[in-house]
Amino acid sequence: MLPSLAQPLLHSPTTATPRRALAASTAPGRFASPARRVAASPLRAVVSGPGVKEMTPAAAEQEARPLRVGLVCGGPSAERGISLNSARSVLDHIQGEDLLVSCYYIDCGMNAYGISPAQLYSNTPSDFDFKLESLAQEFRSLSEFAEHLSANVDIVFPVIHGKFGEDGGIQELLEKKNIPFVGTPSNECRRAFDKHNASLELEAQGFLTVPNFLVEKDKLDKSKLEEWFRSVNLNKENGKVVVKPTRAGSSIGVVVAYGANEAAEKAEGIIAEGIDDKIIIEVFLEGGCEFTAIVIDVGTTNNSQPIVLLPTEVELLSSSNSEIQEDTIFNYRRKYLPTQQVAYHTPPRFPTEVIDCIREGVSLLFRHFGLRDFARIDGWFIPTPATSLSSSENGGKFGNTEYGIVLFTDINLISGMEQTSFLFQQASKVGFSHSRILRTIVQHACSRFPSLVPSNNAWTALFRKMQSAKQAEVIQNGTCKQKAFVIFGGDTSERQVSLMSGTNVWLNLQGFDDLDVTPCLLTPANGYFSSHNQDFSESSRDVWTLPYSLVLRHTTEEVCDACFEAIEPERVAITSRLRGQVMKELEQALRKQDWFAGFDISDEQPSKYSLQQWINHVKEAKAVVFIAVHGGIGEDGTIQSLLESAGVPYTGPGPIASRTCMDKVATSLAVDHLASHGIHTIPKDVRASEELLQTSPVDIWNELKTKLQTVTVCVKPARDGCSTGVARLCCPEDLEVYTNALRRKLQRLPANCLSRAHGVIEMPVPPPESLIFEPYIETDEIIISNEARDDSSRHLVWKGEKEWLEITVGAVGKRGEMHSLNPSITVKESGDILSLEEKFQGGTGINLTPPPASIMSEDALQKCKSCIEMMANTLGLEGFSRIDAFVNVRNGEVLLIEVNTVPGMTPSTVLIHQALTEEPPIYPHKFFRTLLDLAFARAN
C-alpha cells in the first residue's frame, strides 16, 4: 500500500470523483477492475451541440443498464505490441459506469485468453506472455472463446492490427456466432487488406495508382522484374523502389531498395522472415507528400454515410547531418517513436482543391469497399508527377488536380489508437475528445445491429440519467474546480519522452470532475531553432498553455511549430474554414441519432508566457504544478526553486534533492556511507568532452582500464537524463566512434556501429560538457522462451551465474517516509544497454514486475525494497522518483546506477506496472492523482 496522506486541499485520492473508470465488469468476473468511476465526459472546453436531441419519454422509461464491451487485442502480427497500446488507450477513454469493459488477448500462437485490465498497461505482450497460464482465463479454442463472448458481452471492439485483426480473421469468427462487433465485416476486410488486390480494384474503379510488381513465394521471375523496371522508366541497376508485404499492416517490413537485384533480395528476405508470402514492389514517389485521413461512418442502420475528418500531412525529415544516410519512408520507428524524423500537419499544407480531392476520394473508397464505422486511408500528393505516373491514359482518372495528383495506397481497417494517433489528432480538430470519438464509433456500431437496439437504448438511457445527475450536482455544489498545470518539454535530449509523459499525465488527470487541468509546453525563448542557451535565466524560456488538439503531437518541435502556426492569421483562417465545414457535415448527420452527445472540444488558441510570467499566472490561479520535464531545468532544481519561491505547490522532490540526483557523482557520494546496509555504488571516472576530443582514444582507453579495473566500460552523460548517450564500449575503436559522434554532433549512433551488437543509440544534443565512465556490470541474460517445456509454451530462461540483475524501482511518499514499489527487472532485447524505445515506448522492451520468484526470493525482494527506501530517504526524496540499480538476487543488496527525480510517465512506464502490483492495484488515474495530492500535502 502507498502511505496514507495528510488531508490535502483537494479531495483525497479515495474520494475524488474521476469521470472515467475501469468499470467492474462481470465478464469474465474475476478480471474486474477494483476502480469505479463516473461516466466519461471530458473536462475542458465543453461545447454544446446544437443538434443534440433531448431524450424522448420512451427512452427515459427504458430500463437503464451499462453496455458490455469486449476489447480484444494481441494477435500473431509483429504489431501486437502496438495493439496492446491501442487497447490500453481505448480502455482508458471508453470505460465508465455506463460502459463495462472486459479485456481479451490473442497470443502469437492464436490462443485466446481473458486478461485483467492491468495487463494492458504492460510495456509489451512479452511482459506477461509467459505468465498467461497462471494469470489469465484460457479458452480451449477460438470457438469456445467466441461462445464466451456471445454470452458475456453486447459488442466486441477488436483492436488487433495486421493479421487476424484486419484481414477478416477475427470478424469471421464473430460473424459465425452472430456477435456484434465494431468495424468492417470479414469479406470486406479481405478485399481491402491485401494491398495488391486493393490496388487492382482501385485501378479498375478509375483511381490513379502507384505502379507495382507482385512477388509471390517461390515464384520470383527476375527477368520479368527487370522488364517491369523498364516499363515504369526506372533504371534496373539503381532505380529506387519501396518493397513491402501485401498483408502486414502499413509499417512492418517496409524497406527501400535500389535496382531490380536489391529489390528481389529484399522481397525474398521479407518472405524468409515469415512476415508475408506476397510482396509488392512499388515505384518510390520522389518529391511526394504523404498523407493519412480518418473516416468515420455516421449513417443510419446499414446506410453508410462516411465523413472524412481533416487529413494529416506526414512530413518526413532527414537527418541534418550529411554523414547519416536515411531513406525517407514512414517506417515503424518513425510512426511509433517520437523523434525529430517526422512532423505532422493537420490539415495538410496542400491547396484546398487537393484537400477536397483527398476527402472525396477517401469517402468513395470507404463506400466502394463496404467499410463500416471507421477506417484510416493513406496516400500521396505528388505536386510534380513522375514519368511513370503522367501518361496520357491516366489523364481521366480520379486523383488528377490542377496542382498535382492524389494517390491512395493503404487502407487500414483498424487504425492505431495510441494516445497521439491520427484518429485522435484529427478528431480533436473537429470537436471530439478521445472519449467522445471512441464512444461515437461504438454507438454507431451498435446502431447497425438490430439485436443490439434494446442494449443500445438502455445504454443511452443510463448515460442520459448520469448526465442529468451530474448537472444537478453542479447546480447544487457549484462548478469550482482546483486548477492544475502539467508542464513538459524543455530543451534536453529527453524532451520527446517528456512530451509523452506530460500528455499521459494530462489525459489521466483531466478525467477528474474536481480538477481543471491545463497542459503546458516549456520551450527555448525563440523556439527550438534558436541557438542553444546553456546558461539558464528566466528570460531564456517560454511556456505555452495548450488547447486540446495541439498537445496530440509526436515531438516538442512539432507542438511549438503548431503553436506559432495556430496564431498565424492565414493558417488560422484556412483551418477554421475546413474545421467548420467538417463539423457542419458531422452535426447534420449525427443530430439524427438519439445517442449523440454533441462536440466537447472547442477551437481554442494557445497562449505564450515567459517562464516567470507563467509562474505568476499559476500562482494567481492558486494552482498546483505537475512537473513532467525530464532533465535540464526540470530535474536540476531550477523549476522547483522558482515554484517554491512563488509558493506554488509542485510534484516531486525539492530543489536540493533534485540538484543532487541530477549529478550522478554527487548522488553516489551522498549514499556512499550506506555500504554496511547493503547499498553500494559504482566507481566513476569523470572526463570533460573537450578532453576526449583532443586526446588519443588509445591513451584514454588505457587510463580508464587501469583506473576502473575493467575491460569493458559504460559511458553516459554526467548530467543528462537516463536514456541518451549511454553505450557499452569494449575497445579503443568503440571510444573513437563515440567521440566522433560527439564531435560531429550526431543525433544518434546507428545500430551495430560499435564492436558489440546494439540498437540505435540516441545521442544528447547538444553534446554534454562532461561524461562519466564506469565499469560495465555483467548480468545474466534473461530469455522469454516460446519453446515447449513440461507442456508449457512459455517460460523464463535464466542461468543465475552472475547473481546481479538490473532493476528499476519507483519510490512514492512523503519526505522521510518513502515507500518502495515492487521492482521491475529490465530485460534488454537489442544489445547491452536499454534503448530509448525499450525504456519508454509501449510495444517494445520487456519488464518483469515484480521479479519472478524463480529468480528472486521473497526475502531478497524485501531486502531490496528496504535498501531502496533507505536510499530515497537519505537523498531527501519526496513525492515520487525512480531509482535504477543492480540487485544481487541472492541477498537483495543493491548497486546504485542513478536516481531520476522526474521519471518517465509514459502510458507503459514501469511505474504504472509497479503501482498495479500493489494491494489493491493502483490504476493510472489514481496513481497520478496521488502524486498531485502529495504535492498539496507538502505545501500544507
Image: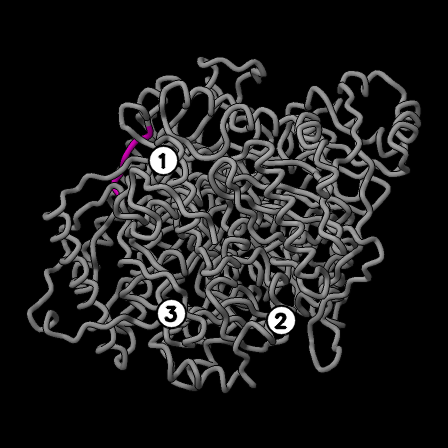
Nearest the camera: 480 or 257? 480
Q: Quadrant of residue 754?
A: top right
Residue 922 higher or lower than 153, as above or below: above
- The colour scheme applied to this rendered structure is one colour
Which residue carries the number 2 mark? 108
Q: Furthest residue to the front? A: 676
Q: Secondary structure at mark 2?
A: loop
| Amino acid type, label 2 | Cys
Q: Secondary structure at mark 1?
A: helix
Pinpoint residue 432: horizontal percent, then vertical percent.
30, 50
* Span highlighted in magenta in the image: 601-606
Which residue carries the number 1 mark? 936
User: Marks 1 and 3: which is nearer the front?
Assistant: 1
- Number of marks in the rendered image: 3
- Distance from Cα at disc 1 to Cα at disc 3: 43 Å
**Would residue 604 be counted in the magenta stretch?**
yes
Residue 315 seen by the camera: no
Pinpoint residue 714: horizontal percent, then vertical percent.
79, 36
- Distance from Cα at disc 2 to Cα at disc 1: 46 Å
Task: Name the residue: 29% across, 49% down.
Answer: 16
Name the disc covering residue 182, or none: 3
Pinpoint residue 571: horizontal percent, then vertical percent.
34, 30
User: Marks 2 and 3: which is nearer the front?
Assistant: 2
| Amino acid type, label 1 | Phe
* Mark 3 neighbour class, 10 Å CA radius: few under 14, some 14 to 19, many 20 or more: many
